[in-house]
Amino acid sequence: MSVLRVLVVDDHEVVRAGLQAVLESEESIQVVGEAGTAREAVESALALKPDVVLLDVRLGEEGDVGGIEACREIRSSLPETRVLMFSSYGERETVVSALLAGASGYLMKNVGRSQLISGLQTVGRGESLLDPSVTKPVLDRLVELSASAKKDDPLSDREKEVLLLIARGRTNREIAEALVISDHTARNHVSHILDKLGLSRRSEAAAYAAKLGLLD
């Protein structure tokens, strides 16, 4: 029986310790490391190359959504590593952003031990998973985003191609390779897209891609 190697990321030390105790009681799971910040999560993932990262959405004292950016970086650098978001927050926009960042699943922290272990194993097999409490709101939101796409969309066809790759978590270098353009041109495209849309983060551009229906 193969052992699932898991990296645990949460900004509360007690929560990390509790998760580690729960997971290591299961013979088929090995906790290979833990992290408390988004940066530590990325660095640990790159060093340990776990099968699955169990990642809290909100990291840091201000309760931001640094976990989503960490997910995007991890998935971009380690496409074979899966990410299961684990959070107390189930707002539609947060869940959609996490999925667009490359997360394979989203579980609420009120699940039981067996559900958590089953969720990790599901994601570890390469399957997708959504907590039942957020499934319908998320699907409804994706339909809304697609239906409300602006007819006066300011992006060119080429910029829409770049936007789709951004939404899929591709780095500037990967965008350049996919479109057979230089890294410099790819960076310029990304900057122009953010400027045109009045956005500041790639995760916001990914959400806009869903709004245009590019991910359908």
Image (tube, rainbow, N blue to C red):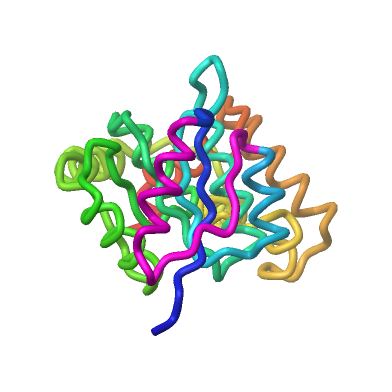
Image quarter (top left, top right, bottom left or bottom right) of the N terminus: bottom left
Q: Nearer the viewer, residue 80 or 185?
A: 80
Single out the residue that lies furthest toward the top: 62
Residue 172 location, quadrant: bottom right
Single out the residue that lies furthest toward the bottom: 1
Instruction: Identify the residue shown where x is 26% and y is 62%.
Output: 118
Residue 181 location, quadrant: bottom right
Left or right: residue 90 compared with residue 7: left
Label count reads 0
Instruction: Identify the residue shown where x is 62% and y is 45%.
Output: 41
Up the image or down, 161 lies above or below 85; here it is below
Instruction: Identify the residue shown where x is 85% and y is 52%.
Output: 184
Spot occupied by residue 149 in the image (x, y as percentages of width and height): 34, 39
Q: Nearer the viewer, residue 60 or 6?
A: 6
Task: Give the magenta-colored segment's residue range.
Answer: 14-38
Spot occupied by residue 29 in the image (x, y as percentages of width and height): 42, 66
Spot occupied by residue 87 in the image (x, y as percentages of width and height): 36, 35
Instruction: Let me know if residue 16 is in the magenta part.
Output: yes
Image quarter (top left, top right, bottom left or bottom right) of the C terminus: bottom left
Instruction: Let me know if residue 94 is in the magenta part.
Output: no
Spot occupied by residue 45 in the image (x, y as percentages of width and height): 64, 55
Up the image or down, 129 lies above or below 127; here it is above
Left or right: residue 165 compared with residue 195: left
Q: Nearer the viewer, residue 1 or 134?
A: 1
Q: Nearer the viewer, residue 142 or 195?
A: 142
